[in-house]
Image (cartoon, rainbow, N blue to C red):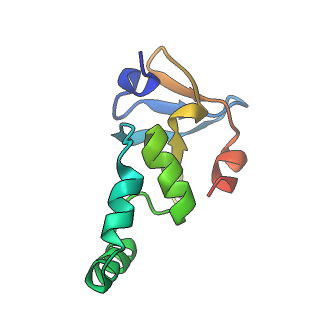
Amino acid sequence: MDVLETVSKGMRVVDVSGEEIGAVEHIVPPNAKAETFEEAATASTQDLLNLGLSAVFGREPRVPELMARRLFHSGYIKIDARGFWATDSYAAADAINRVEEGKVYLNLTRHELAAQV
């Protein structure tokens, strides 16, 4: 069973050190065709303009292109970070160690997760 199938919106997310870092805001399953779509989308100037605008005004995930490809291919969760100044983050499916007792446990620290981007 795919680990993302066991994750639900609102579950608390805990890093490898045991620190609660936020809650699952969004779950995106793997998409093997993501790279093909990106190549097709960047084939014309108009599409490039649309991609640029969507990147500025809310395209998810808000990460560099290489990281976005990795996230789309493996599937990912968006983590709504705790705290007023905290920044939301994304965890690829392979960063999830386990899901139990209504929580998602990562195999990375909060800082390692942020450094992936």
Q: Is residue 62 left or right of residue 33?
A: right
Seen in the picture, residue 92 relative to 40 is either above or below; the reply is above
Q: Quadrant of the C terminus?
A: bottom right
Q: Quadrant of the N terminus?
A: top left
Q: Position of residue 38 (x, y in %)?
A: 37, 62
Seen in the picture, residue 65 relative to 104 is either above or below; the reply is below
Q: Is residue 73 left or right of residue 51?
A: right
- Of residues 71 and 57, the one nearer the viewer is 71
Q: Position of residue 57 (x, y in %)?
A: 33, 74
Q: Position of residue 36 (x, y in %)?
A: 36, 55
The answer to whether one can see residue 50 in this image is: yes
Residue located at (68% from left, 37% from top): 108
Residue located at (46% from left, 63% from top): 62
Residue 5 position by quadrant: top left
Q: Is residue 114 left or right of residue 40?
A: right
Q: Position of residue 40 (x, y in %)?
A: 32, 66
Residue located at (71% from left, 47% from top): 112
